[in-house]
Image: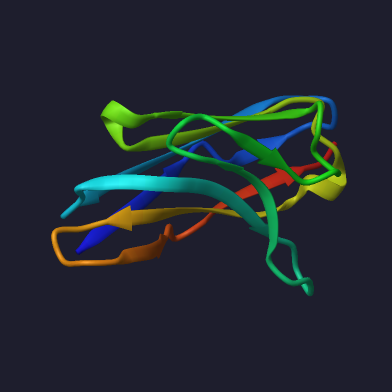
Amino acid sequence: QVQLVESGGGLVQPGGSLRLSCAASGSIVAIDAMGWYRQAPGKQRELVATITSGGSTNYADSVKGRFTISRDNAKNSVYLQMNSLKPEDTAVYYCNALVRRTSPGLYLYWGQGTQVTVSS
């Protein structure tokens, strides 16, 4: 089994910053892509950013220039630096990971989510 644990959420004022972390553990041979998604109340879960094992990144248009995704392959971890936060960034943020295990194939795992609230 594989577990993803997020941390770093909280309450921040508009214009502020937060850094989210997500660590994967368990029966991991390697991790391909990792990503961050978010879900606001009454809305569907949406992509925020993804990063491949080689470091290629992809961002939602709404966060480009404000958020930065990074990863530490040695620690099986992914991070999301969020700057210039806006009230519309308020959501539960989830990380995911596409994992290679000892059994054939790729497996997609999700974290439990961490709340980010941007409010004055």
Q: What residue is at 51 percent from the left and 29 percent from the top?
A: 55
Q: What residue is at 78 percent from the left and 74 percent from the top?
A: 42
Residue 46: horizontal and vertical position, in percent? 71, 61
**Front residue (pair 36, 86):** 36
What coloring was used for the rendering? Answer: rainbow
Identify the image quadrant of the N terminus: bottom left
**Front residue (pair 16, 76):** 76
Residue 65: horizontal and vertical position, in percent? 81, 26
Position of residue 98 relative to residue 50, above or below, is below
Identify the image quadrant of the C terminus: top right
Q: What residue is at 84 percent from the left and 32 percent from the top?
A: 14
Residue 76 placement, left or right of 94: left
Residue 108: horizontal and vertical position, in percent? 40, 64
Residue 82 placement, left or right of 54: right
Residue 93 placement, left or right of 12: left
Residue 88: horizontal and vertical position, in percent? 86, 49
Q: What residue is at 62 percent from the left and 35 percent from the top?
A: 57
How many marks do you count on the picture? 0
* Quarter holding residue 30: top left
Residue 74 placement, left or right of 44: left
